Amino acid sequence: MTRRVLALLSCLIVAAAGLLTGGATLGRAPSTAAPRCVDVHVLFARGTVEEAPPLGVTGIAFGNAVRNRLPGKSVRIEAVDYAASGNFTDRLAFARTFVDGVKTAQRRVKSIAAACPDTRIVIGGYSQGGALAGYAISSAYRVPDRYQQYRTYVPEPLPAAVAPHIAAVVEFAPPSARFLREAGAPPVQPQAVYRNRTVEYCIQGDTICNGAPLGGPNALHLLYSVNGMADQAADYVARHL
């Protein structure tokens, strides 16, 4: 798959997602905005160097689908503020940006839960962002021996008091266990309390999430915003609120 073809597919999907937005406002809230509690707060992490930041096209499609499933409820869709870096040649630099993203997501979850105790939180992500969502709810992080000097930088598990506020965790095309292992990353180990409210979506044949050897994405990896899985995920969220 050439970069030119991937770029073309990305542009097509961006255009399709643009049609889906229907004028909705999605993304980060201004840092000066006054705190505002909503019924449902979706925190979504985009994929690696994904088009249409800050949410990415999958996040836009998913956010709109959630809104459509919840008429009469106030819904906020917020992007996790992280680099979504594609700097895989420098693993340490990449790991730092990724871990910063996990910590950012966890801080936002704790902040929302504290400020808006009646708000139902949904954590989501696509590709690298799907892994981020998984690590955000992990119970432990097994750091490879060669990186033990960085152990103090590893995120802490979310506190138990936060769990009742999290309604669902949705992961689109998260890197498979084999992919993570071959990349030298620790396995995702969700806390037990989240296992029955977490769902993964993987297109059959998507080599990032289907257990294929470590490698780059194929065209199937780009289709989550238009293949119906965003709607399936929104249905899942609606059932868990």
Image: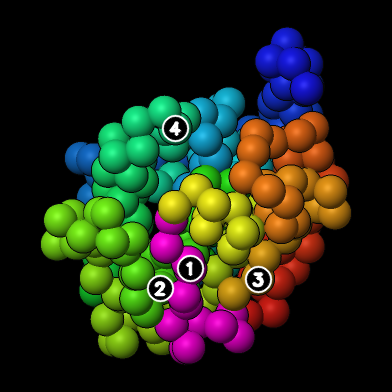
Nearest to the eye among marks 2 and 3: give it.
2
The residue beneath circle 3 is 199
Q: Which residue does the image show at 78% across and 22% down from the upper left?
A: 1
Q: Left of 48 or right of it: where is 15?
A: right
Choose top left, top right, bottom left or bottom right for residue 115.
bottom left
Relative to 113, residue 143 above or below: above
Disc number lying in front (1 or 2) = 1
Q: Secondary structure at mark 1?
A: loop
Q: What's the magenta region?
A: 185-197
Task: State if disc 2 and disc 4 touch (CB < 8 Å).
Answer: no
Check disc 1: other Cα within 10 Å, few if <14, some if 14-19, many if 20+: many
Q: What SS does tag 3 mark?
A: strand
Above or below, 71 against 14 in this view is below
What residue sits right under mark 4 in the picture?
A: 88
Magenta region includes residue 190: yes
Look at mark 1 in the image and give the residue it sits on: 188
Q: For numbered disc 4, what is the local secondary structure? A: loop
In x, y percent, where is residue 206? Answer: 77, 47
Viewer-proximal residue among 206 and 168: 206
| Disc 4/disc 2 C-alpha distance (Å) | 23 Å
Check disc 1 and give the amino acid type. Val
Q: Is the Cβ of the residue at disc 1 closer than 8 Å to that at disc 2?
A: yes
Three-letter amino acid code at the position of disc 2:
Ser
Residue 138 tag number? 2
Q: Is residue 106 visible?
A: no
Which sits earlier in the primary sequence, circle 1 or circle 4? Answer: 4
Label 3 and label 4: CA atoms lie apart by 27 Å
Tag 2 or tag 4, which sits nearer the N-term? 4
